[in-house]
Amino acid sequence: YEVIKTQIINDRGIAICKSMVAWSKYGNGETPESLGIKGDLLVGNYYVKFDKKIKEEYAEWQHSDAGLSSFENHKKENEEPDAFYKRYKNDYFNNESKLGNEAKAMLLKWEAGDEETLSLWKKMNGWVYGGFDNTYEKLGVTFDILYYESQTYLLGKENIYQGLEKGLFYKKEDGSIWVDLEDEGYDQKILLRSDGTSVYMTQDVGTAIQRHKDYGIDKMVYTVGDEQDYHFQVLFEILKKMGEPYAEDLHHLSYGMVELPTGRMKSREGTVVDADDLYEEVISEARGSTEERGGVPGVDIEEQNDILKKIGLGALKFFILKVTAKKKMIFNPAESVDMQGQTGPYIQNAYVRIQSILRKVEGEMPTQVPDYALDEIEKKLIKDAASLPSVIHEAAEKYDPSTIANYVYNLAKTFHRYYHDFRILGAENEADKNFRLLLIKKVGDVLKTGMTLLGIEMPERM
């Protein structure tokens, strides 16, 4: 397949309006420049600020006459106040919260094209995009095309109204539009709110249709956390109901959540780990580990920093990719750079050892494979190195990059054992040396190919 790497950016909706409301009320004109921080971090901080303020508002409301009245009017039989208020918080946001009403009003203004609202939105989004670009550049992440929900939601709304006319969807008394998927084993799902504003599903419908218009795609693989499993099951059923030609070939590559030794991360509570901080931490761990081993001899500071970046990012990416996507995992920065564990640096070290040996070869590398009595470990190296195409095929069939990650680790592990047990440049005779040089060169090539597929660069020295 021709593969198109794409990212959908959630740049509109109620969550974005929460950040905008919080900055408008509490920001005092702060900018990334005035604070000396990245723009995406600043906007994220105001998302957290909104959540904090609405919790304070909700706690105060619970003891007010309005809150006590809601409890009496909406509680279930024998329901205690604490249980009721825990259950009622979403209804409170939608029906009674002053801050919630401000966020919803801002969303209505945004969709109506209010100039002041759009101006604020463009400014804050610009801060976020600048931060995203900076982080992606550091991580070596690129996309072929970006889609913005601020653009695709209109196409989603248009197609939902068309589906309503065709009888695929239905309208409730309050004017909201829904789809009934009970026959498909799901529930009834809202597609447009009663005030006409769109929801996440609206935007995802529009994005899928736009991608097919742009590329005529055969398949789409959505790489999104497992908290959205149900959402994507419903999205795919809606697209099937709408008769979209690609709807049978949609796949949610569902990722288990990544946690840290300190626990789970939550964006609303501000307990997320900033990607840039994590980047700096793995580089720092790589630096500390390298210095313990005497540094990188014979290279200047610039090259050493480049090597440390490759080691740190290799550690970060490999540690996450070696775990089957659906499994939850704990990322430990210190453990990720362990040279003796199942880590990126362990595999990079195997490659670096091979390159170090090859640099010492006097004259040209041999080109002919000599007669040679293979040892069992050499048979294994040859067999394993030759299986790369089938491993790639298996990973593609299963949508599972951990297949490749574990393959290159096992190949590196076998090489390290071979390196320990067999002399290569100091082999007993020329034929043995030439065979072993050809063998380790091929192993090095395969290690590099496998790691490159995982987005990991190989340093030439460590």
Image: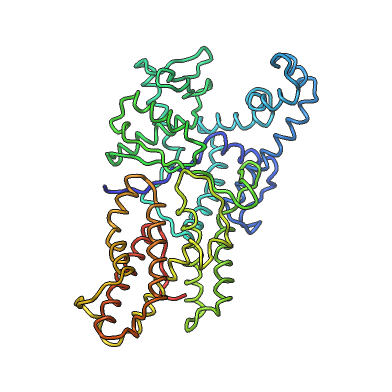
**Up-down relation of residue 320 to residue 312 (above or below):** above
- Which residue corresponds to the image point at 29% horizontal and 41% vertical from the top-left? 215
Give the x, y percent position of residue 52.
70, 39
Give the x, y percent position of residue 157.
42, 27
Residue nearer the viewer, 454 or 218: 454
**Up-down relation of residue 260 to residue 61 (above or below):** below
- Which residue corresponds to the image point at 46% horizontal and 15% vertical from the top-left? 171
Q: Residue furthest bottom?
A: 362
Indicate how the structure is coloured in the image: rainbow
Residue nearer the viewer, 95 or 432: 432
- Which residue corresponds to the image point at 30% horizontal and 77% vertical from the top-left? 437
Examine the image and state in which quarter residue 211 appears: top left
- Which residue corresponds to the image point at 70% horizontal and 47% vertical from the top-left? 28
**Up-down relation of residue 89 to residue 274 (above or below):** above
**Up-down relation of residue 337 to residue 292 (above or below):** above
Q: How many marks?
A: 0
